[in-house]
Amino acid sequence: MIALGCDHGGYELKQEIIKYLEENNIEYKDFGCDSTDSTDYPIYAKRVAIAIQNGDCEKGILICGTGIGISITANKFKGIRAALCSDCFSAEATRLHNNANILAMGGRVVGPGLAVKIVDTFLNTPFSEEERHIRRIKQIEEDTDITDAYPEI
């Protein structure tokens, strides 16, 4: 199950993504928003991140005007690896190397044709399972304080 979320800046692009998902018989849950009326992106990023954290959804797609704010918000949640992508190469690499579980895009940055290709790439690229990538993901997820990164402090 794919979790979808957007603010007003991503609403129209989300509709294109929904068409793609439905045409490909991919189950999804839409966590909003439901129009182009101004709204706050953190609401929808949090809903999608929680749906992935609790196992209701396997992956997520988040869209705001630039994709930046919504991805920053999602990445605050433990176990979430949201990647802002505006090209297929990045979407493929973030699945292969980072096992990203949320794709973020900018509705004012990426057109619908490219967005659908990015989504297709993201959803159909498996994690590589290579040891070096597993090790790096563990390092990302470790709780770290500044003295871990800079022991001289």
Image (cartoon, grey):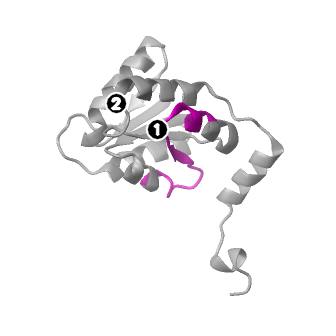
Q: Amino acid at mark 1?
A: Ser
Q: Name the outermost residue toward the bottom.
A: 153
Residue 39's spot in the image, x, y percent?
23, 48
Q: Is residue 134 visible?
A: yes
Q: Is residue 46 visible?
A: no
Q: Name the outermost residue toward the left.
A: 37
**Residues drawn in magenta:** 73-92
Q: Residues within 10 Å of mark 2 (few under 14, many from 20)?
A: many
| Residue 98 badge | none
**Residue 88 counted in the magenta span:** yes
Q: Residue at x 45, y 50 (%)?
A: 71
Q: Nearer the viewer, residue 25 or 67?
A: 67
Where disc 2 sits, the SS reads helix
Q: Earlier in the sequence, mark 1 or mark 2?
A: 2
Q: Residue at x 57, y 55 (%)?
A: 78
What is the distance, in whole Å, between disc 1 and disc 2 at their CAs?
A: 15 Å
Number of labelled discs? 2
Q: Is residue 152 left or right of residue 76?
A: right
Quadrant where the C terminus sits is bottom right
Residue 12's spot in the image, x, y percent?
27, 30
Would you name the residue on which mark 2 appears? Answer: 14
Q: Amino acid at mark 2?
A: Lys
Q: Is residue 99 left or right of residue 107?
A: right
Residue 16's spot in the image, x, y percent?
34, 23
Q: Nearer the viewer, residue 116 or 129?
A: 116
Q: Residue at x 32, y 30 (%)?
A: 13
Residue 40's spot in the image, x, y percent?
27, 51
Q: Residues within 10 Å of mark 1 (few under 14, many from 20)?
A: many
| Residue 86 badge | 1
Q: Quadrant of residue 107?
A: top left
- 1 and 2 marks in contact (CB < 8 Å): no
